[in-house]
Image: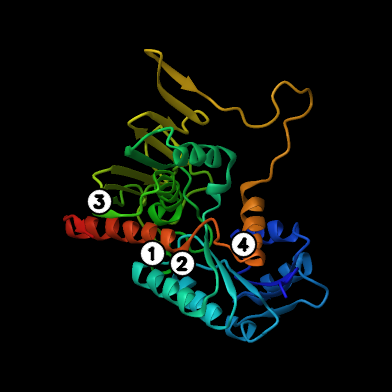
C-alpha cells in the first residue's frame, strides 16, 4: 500500500534547517518530523520542541538516528564536508534523502552519493530551491518550449558587494570546500544548466581570488569578518565550454567592488530570443522587424490590497519533494544534474590552481 504520511528525520539543526527545511516541512499535513540530530544537542532539542511530534527523539550521533526503521526520509543540513558520508549512510539505511546544496564537497563524493541512490533504489535530491521561484519556473517552461531557440551563450550570476557570511563554518575551507563559488555560485550554475537543458561540459577554466579577506572596516552586511578564519576565496570566476559549443560564464563573490550585484540569476542568449533576471524576468527578441522586451507579471495585478497568493520557493520545494516520494516519481532536482554542477565547480577550483583548462 502507498503511504499517505511520511516520517522525517533532520540531521543538522542549524541555520538552513531552521530557516528553510523545518518551517516548510511543518506546513505539510502528510509529514511528521520525528527525529532531530545535531552535534550540539541543545540545537536538536530546540528543533524537536518547535517542529517535532510530541514523542520526537533527539540525537547527537546521526548513525543512531538512522537505526530507526520507522523513519522514511532524511533531510541533511550539515556542512558540505559531511554531505556524502551521511547521505550514503541514510540511503543504505533505506531512507530517501534531501541533501542541502551543494551535493558534496568534491565530485568524487557526489558520484558516491549518486551510486548509493541507484544501488538502494531510494530517492535523492539536492536543495536547489531557486528552481521553484515563479520567475525560474516561467523561464524554464519558455526554454523547454523552444521560445529562446538554441541557447549558445549564458551567464550565471552570484555577485555580492559586501555580504560575507561570518557565522558557522562558511569561511572554513576544510569544512565547506570553498567560499562564494560553492555557496552561491552553485545556485546560479544550477539554474543556468537547468534552463539550457545541457549537462555535458567539455572544458572549464577558472580563476579564484583571495583579495579582500585581510581588510578591516569592510561595511560587510554581517559585520567585519575574521581575517584569520577567512580561508576560502572572496570571489571566483569560471569559463565553461559545453560539448555542443555553448559557452557559460560563471561569476561569484561574497565581496567585490561592483554595483552589478545579484545572485541566483541567469542570463541566456539563444537563436530566437534572450532572457535575463536583472530587473525581474525579461525576455527579449525581435518580432515584425522590431525589437521587444517582455516582462511577465507575477502576483495579482490591479487588485487593491492583494498581491496574490503563491508558495515560497522553499515551501514548494518541500511539497514537491514529498509528493515525488509518495507518488514514486522523479524529484525536480535530479542527483545526476546536481553532480554535474559539483563537477564544474571542482573544475574551476582545479583550473585556478594549475592555470590550465580542465577537460571532461
Between marks 2 and 1, how big is the CA–CA gap?
A: 7 Å
Side (left or right) of 81 relative to 313: left
Side (left or right) of 83 relative to 286: right
Labels 4 and 3 touching (C-beta < 8 A)? no
- Number of other residues with Cα within 10 Å of mark 3, as a class: few under 14, some 14 to 19, many 20 or more: some
Q: Note whether 301 is above or below 80 in the view shown.
A: above
Side (left or right) of 337 relative to 352: right
As drawn, the label of residue 177 is 1
Looking at this view, is 349 or 224 the one in front?
349
Q: Note whether 351 is above or below 267 in the view shown.
A: below
Give the structural element (helix, strand or loop) at label 1: loop
Q: Is residue 178 visible?
A: no
Q: Is residue 296 visible?
A: yes
Between marks 3 and 1, how big is the CA–CA gap?
A: 27 Å
Pinpoint residue 246: horizontal percent, then vertical percent: 27, 43
Q: Mark 3 points at which residue?
A: 243
Q: Decide which of tag 3 and tag 1 comes sooner along the chain.
A: 1
Q: Which residue sits at x=51%, y=74%?
A: 87
Q: Name the residue under label 4.
A: 324
As drawn, the label of residue 80 is 2
Between marks 1 and 4, how big is the CA–CA gap?
A: 30 Å
Between marks 2 and 3, how big is the CA–CA gap?
A: 29 Å
Q: Quadrant of residue 38?
A: bottom right
Amino acid at each position: 500500500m502507498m503511504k499517505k504520511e511520511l516520517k522525517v528525520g533532520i540531521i543538522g539543526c542549524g541555520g538552513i534547517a531552521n530557516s528553510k527545511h523545518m518551517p516548510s516541512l511543518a506546513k505539510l499535513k502528510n509529514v511528521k518530523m520525528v527525529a532531530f540530530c545535531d552535534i550540539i544537542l541543545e540545537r536538536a532539542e530546540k528543533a524537536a520542541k518547535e517542529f517535532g511530534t510530541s514523542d520526537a527523539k533527539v540525537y547527537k550521533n546521526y548513525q543512531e538516528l538512522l537505526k530507526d526503521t520507522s523513519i522514511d526520509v532524511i533531510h541533511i543540513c550539515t556542512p558540505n564536508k559531511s554531505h556524502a558520508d551521511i547521505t550514503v549512510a541514510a540511503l543504505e539505511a533505506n531512507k530517501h534523502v534531501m541533501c542541502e546544496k551543494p551535493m558534496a564537497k568534491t565530485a568524487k563524493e557526489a558520484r558516491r552519493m549518486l551510486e548509493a541512490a541507484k544501488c538502494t533504489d531510494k530517492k535523492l535530491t539536492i536543495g536547489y530551491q531557486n528552481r521553484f521561484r515563479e520567475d525560474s519556473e516561467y523561464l524554464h517552461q519558455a526554454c523547454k518550449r523552444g521560445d529562446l531557440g538554441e541557447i549558445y551563450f549564458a551567464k550565471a550570476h552570484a555577485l555580492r558587494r559586501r555580504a560575507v557570511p561570518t557565522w558557522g563554518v562558511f569561511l572554513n575551507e576544510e569544512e565547506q570546500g570553498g567560499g562564494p563559488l560553492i555557496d552561491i555560485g552553485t545556485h546560479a550554475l544550477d539554474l543556468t544548466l537547468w534552463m539550457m537543458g545541457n549537462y555535458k561540459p567539455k572544458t572549464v577554466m577558472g580563476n579564484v581570488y583571495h583579495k579582500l579577506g585581510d581588510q578591516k572596516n569592510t561595511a560587510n552586511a554581517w559585520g567585519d569578518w575574521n581575517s584569520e578564519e577567512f580561508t576560502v576565496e572572496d570571489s571566483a570566476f569560471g569559463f565553461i565550454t559545453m560539448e555542443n559549443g555553448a559557452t557559460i560564464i560563471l561569476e561569484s563573490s561574497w565581496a567585490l567592488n561592483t554595483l552589478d550585484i545579484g545572485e541566483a540569476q541567469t542570463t541566456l542568449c539563444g537563436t530566437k530570443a534572450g532572457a535575463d533576471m536583472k530587473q525581474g524576468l525579461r525576455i527579449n527578441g525581435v518580432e515584425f522587424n522590431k525589437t521587444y522586451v517582455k516582462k511577465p507579471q507575477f502576483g495579482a495585478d490591479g487588485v487593491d490590497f492583494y498581491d496574490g497568493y503563491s508558495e515560497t520557493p522553499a515551501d514548494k520545494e518541500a511539497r514537491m519533494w514529498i509528493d515525488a516520494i509518495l507518488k514514486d516519481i522523479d524529484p525536480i532536482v535530479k542527483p545526476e544534474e546536481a553532480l554535474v554542477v559539483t563537477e564544474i565547480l571542482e573544475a574551476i577550483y582545479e583550473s585556478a590552481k594549475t592555470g590550465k583548462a580542465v577537460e571532461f
